Amino acid sequence: MEPPGPQAIHHDPEFHAMRRAYGSFGTVAVLLAAGGFLSYVLLSSFAPDLMNLRLVGHLTVGLTLGLAQFVVMGVAAWRYTRHMSKRIDPTVRRLRAQQRQREQQQTRVPAGRRFRTW
C-alpha cells in the first residue's frame, strides 16, 4: 500500500524518471550556455588580437561572438520550453491527476457521517 498524502508521489518510478530528465537537461543546458559565455569572456581577456580580427567591414570576431550569445540564449530557452512541454509537463499532469485521485479516495466520508456546513 502506498503511503498517505503527498509523500506517495516520491515513491513513483515515473516521478524519479521525470526528475532525472529535468536534471540532466538542465545540467547540459547550463553548462553549454555558461561555457559559451565564459569562453567569450576569456577570449576577450586573453586573446584580444583574435577578438579584434575584422571579418567584414567593421564586423569583428568579438562582435560576432558577442551577438552569438543572444542566439545561444534564445536557442537554449526554446529547447527548454520544448523539452518541458514534451517530456516533463505530460508526466506532471499524470502525477497530479493520480495525486488528486488518491486524496479524494482518502478524504471520502461514509454516507451516514456527513456533516452540514454552517
Image: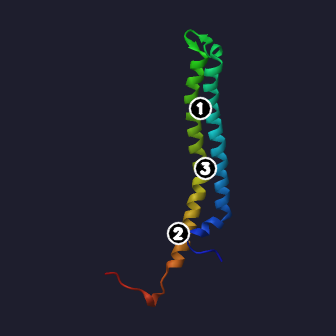
Element carrying mark 3: helix
Residue at screen point 57% across, 68% down: 98
Q: Which quadrant: the C terminus?
A: bottom left
* Vertical relation: 95 (above or below) 1: above
Percent across and percent down for residue 29 are 63, 40
Q: Which quadrant: the N terminus?
A: bottom right
The residue wearing badge 3 is 86
Q: In the image shown, does 37 or 47 lie closer to the viewer?
A: 47
| Horizontal side, residue 111 vs residue 33: left or right | left
Q: Amino acid at mark 1?
A: Val
Q: Amino acid at mark 2?
A: Arg
Q: CA distance from mark 3 to mark 1?
A: 21 Å
**Mark on residue 100?**
2
Residue at screen point 60% across, 53% down: 88
Which badge, 3 or 1, is on the more N-terminal residue? 1
Which badge, 3 or 2, is on the more N-terminal residue? 3
Q: Nearer the viewer, mark 3 or mark 2?
A: 2
The residue wearing badge 1 is 72
Residue at screen point 62% across, 40% down: 30
Element carrying mark 1: helix
* Vertical relation: 103 (above or below) 51: below
